Amino acid sequence: MIVRTWRRTVRVATITTLSATAVFGAVPKAPPAPTRSTELHGQVSVREVEISVALPDDISLFRLRSLGGADFIVLRDGKEQPVARAERSRGDDRPWRAVIWLDDLLAAPESLNSWAQALGERAKDLAKLGSVEIVVADPLLHTALAATSDARAIKAALETAGAAARSRAGAGSSKWKPPGAAELQAELVRLVDWVAARRAVGPRALWLAIDGRPMPMAAVGQLYSAIPAVGEDEAVTALRSLGLGLAGTGWTTLALTTPIRKSTGGTESPESSYDRWHREVLPNKPDRLAISLFRWPPLRSRSVFDSRTLDAELDPALAAPRLVAEQSGGYMLPGPWELRPTLDQLAERWRVWIRADEAPDGKLHTLSVMLKKGGELRSTRWLLSPAPESPEGQ
């Protein structure tokens, strides 16, 4: 999301930094950069916020051609916001800023290599959307490629990053395991702080390699709860906060996952999650958890139905990556076969601007976007309000 500020006829930019402390709780780190704004005394601040929105696949061409700002409804904390304008992202403008994040702590080396190679094969498509930056944490955080739209440079950097991950996998003495709660929270704080410090404008996407995390169904229920449960697993709390933090900064998260292979007695189970869902859930009354996990089927107009995608959508071990993506209006990608339809969908997204005249409070607020005479659209579910400005002289 972009926050711009106008004071009557004078346009000034307000730059806001989200501290990970706001979503992860107190952490021992330096204070965030202060909010800066040009002061024009005696005038009222009106902010304009940009939201990236995905339209339904079945929307008619006739309606698509006639769409405008008046066709969108945006709710902030349940209160309707005035829509300033809306427009479709134009491919020729290459509006997207993308960051590919490859982190040894969030995904196994084999997964990082697999996704680096798959994204490298789509380097031209990525470059058509806009600039691409590649960040690697192994565990030292460094930029493997500065933002560029050069497809050859993108592919080469991804191949190099994949080869490095592959070599680390070969040199490893033990199999990769999901990090503990404390280690995971520290890494997610670093991720949110890094992303929040990028004061980019326009639509932006975070391609985040993040493997599944085995968890019981009770933990999945906690993950989808708006309010943390008493005694909640700290890893669940950290993952939920990651979704809030990334959504609040306006980045659309594409969670690049690798499904965990299930086995019975040392052999891979022939029964899919789709089979189990039909056998165990459908004959009984569906509970809220089952409905929430099946809320957004993965079908999209340019993708052929793939049972592997549905398996991933129903897999409790992938509930965390899926929620992280959904909070920001993004997608979970369980395999390279989802890259093309996802890239196509990003290219067709709309940009909706709303005017927010509420006083800045530095807090996260719920957000919902829908079409008139239509259902809720895929967009970020959270809006970060700028921090309130300090009184003059303080």
Image (spheres, helix red, strand yellow):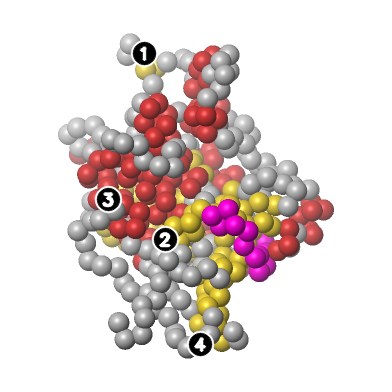
Bounds of the magenta span?
76-89
Between the residue at mark 2 and the residue at mark 4, the CA separation in whole angstroms equals: 25 Å
Dot in front, 2 or 4: 4
Q: Give the mark nearest the N terminus, 2 or 1.
A: 1
Which amino acid, mark 1?
Thr
Q: Name the secondary structure under disc 1.
A: strand
Where does the image place residue 140, in percent across and percent down from the top left?
23, 55
Question: Where residue 324 sits: x, y (%)?
Answer: 43, 45
Where does the image place residue 312, in percent across and percent down from the top left?
A: 48, 31
Residue 108 visible in the shown view: no
| Mark seen at residue 129 | none
- The secondary structure type at the circle numbered 3 is helix
Q: CA distance from mark 3 to mark 4?
A: 43 Å
Q: Residue 44, relative to residue 247: is it above or below?
A: below
The residue indicated by pointer 1 is 264
Q: Which residue is mark 3?
A: 187
